[in-house]
Image: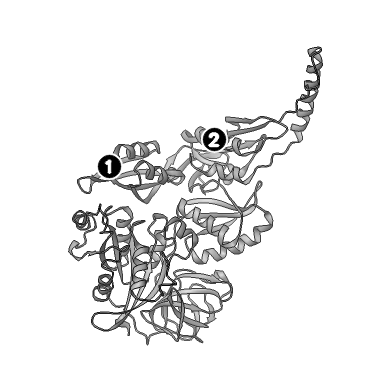
Amino acid sequence: MKNNIRNFSIIAHIDHGKSTLSDRLIQATNIVSTRNFKDQILDSMDIERERGITIKSQSVCLPYTAKDNKNYILNLIDTPGHVDFSYEVSRALASCEGAFLIVDASQGVEAQTIANMYLAIEHDLEIIPIINKIDLPSADIDWVKTQIKEDLGLDPDSALLISAKEGIGINNVLENAVKNLPAPEGDSSLPLKALIFDSNYDSYRGTIIHLRIFQGEIKPGDSIVFMSNNVNYKVEETGIFQITRIPKKKLSAGEVGYIIAGIKTVSDTKCGDTVTQKNTPCDKPLEGFIEAKPVVFSSIYPISSDEYPDLVRAIEKLKLNDASLIFEKDSSAALGFGFRCGFLGLLHLEVVQERLEREYGLSLILTAPSVQYEVFLTDSTKLMIDNPALYPDPGSIDITKEPYIKASIIVPDKYMGAIMKLCVERRGTNSNYQYLTNKRIEIFFELPLAEIVYDFYDKLKSITQGYGSFDYITLDYRETDLVKVDILINSERVDALSQLVHKNMAVSRAKYACEKLKDEIPRQMFKIAIQGAIGAKIITRQTISAFRKDVTAKCYGGDISRKRKLLEKQKKGKKRMKIVGKVLIPQSAFLSVLKSE
């Protein structure tokens, strides 16, 4: 039975056609009726459909009768392409023996194509290249084959030519999966050893665990144990994914499927954990995934403090489905109780915020994203600071260091000057470049991570008209001149608006924040001063002028001193009002500061 199973993943750069190919493979194997079919069928979230991106790896079991008249089970795991979700890709690849690497026939090899190929090589997978979108007028197959040979080191003659949109060459992909991808190894008679590669929460059934069985078998009624925390459960249901969950009598070595065991304690399930039998456990756990390293930090608070318990429950359930989300409790004088969260990038931050708001009906405020800094105090103590509220007194600081990355940017060579200018503006150093083909160039820059998380990716896409692709690896920490910029409203510090920035950027960031707040905060009966400050030094100021009642309207002509007297009286009243006046800051004001210029 095991020889008739193939477990494979589809990997590619963002927007090269992974989800479209998955759609065609699902249609070719007839597991969904034409009436129930919809585009991007594996992308179950509204946000994925709206943005046209895959956020979650999704698995589906495809029954296929090959040309040799044998029946095969193809377990396909569709993966995201965006750099922020490469952690999802690594988890999917841990469950596979092979991968189809898609390259766009008009755009060629891009940054994430190379990054995802290296991930597949690390997991020792068989890689088959696919050239997609061959129906486009701008498709250049020979040029792409040259790139597959030179940039990826794969055999260009083995590349499959397809158009996922038009359905060209789809059966060839299925036949290649059967012929050229290895069957899974593992003995069903040995003790159970299964890897949790994903999970999600069902309000009726509890946690649904997505598993790859490496050895042994699992069936309803079995007592299982999670090896990371020794928690026991009894299996209620086992099955496979065919868009919907299809129950099966058992899952054996080599198969991919799900189990339900009435798990209501959300924190018991961890991605990368090993599941084994309670009575006959396996000798040692499987090697889990690499721990996700968050690079962007932001605090999430509910708009209404009554919603805090709902946020606690929602974030725990979301953690099940998104193992790369890291969080701890946090509190703010301005916003109350919330969570300090670590994300893999700005898109990841946006997606988590949208999922919490849509799937759990919460209204949230996020603080300005920051990275993790190393701060060395004069007494040789080392602190890791990602929250401006925890930044120590500048007088006690010896040196500060910030994380650096090595960015790899692939663009047509006509955009080289614009990219160089952008990277130098963002304090980029040690640049070099190489020509991949006669018109495509790969530029390398070492940049501070803090300059990337703000709006670098948006700027890159706009100046290269969408042709630029971007990938990075983290390097080390380097010395920097860091300051904490505070925002004061009516001389009161608003901790949720504080930011840690490089000294050269402090004035422009503070100015931008003050201008945005001036547009968003409604006028009062008294003047409101909005100030940006570094310590006690004010570096920028905006003033919201007061509403003013026309007290002189009833004076027709007459002596000017009469009018002056009324205005002086009004002035004194306003002064008194200003002393006790409190400013209400709307939610949109917090959000406006986060948006890039």
The amino acid type of the residue labelled 1 equals: Asn
Q: Residues within 10 Å of mark 2 (few under 14, many from 20)?
A: many
Horizontal and vertical percent position of residue 134? 25, 59
Q: Residues within 10 Å of mark 1 (few under 14, many from 20)?
A: few
Q: Residue at the location (30% across, 60% down)?
A: 118
| Sequence order check, earlier mark of 1 and 2 | 1
Horizontal and vertical percent position of residue 537? 58, 30
Q: Quadrant of residue 455?
A: top left
Horizontal and vertical percent position of residue 493? 64, 39
Quick check: 459 left or right of 493? left
Find residue 432 and name its label: 1
The residue tagged 2 is: 510
- Could you say which is closer to the camera, residue 176 or residue 207? 176
Q: Residue at the location (57% across, 51% down)?
A: 299
Q: CA distance from mark 1 to mark 2?
A: 33 Å
Q: Secondary structure at mark 2?
A: helix
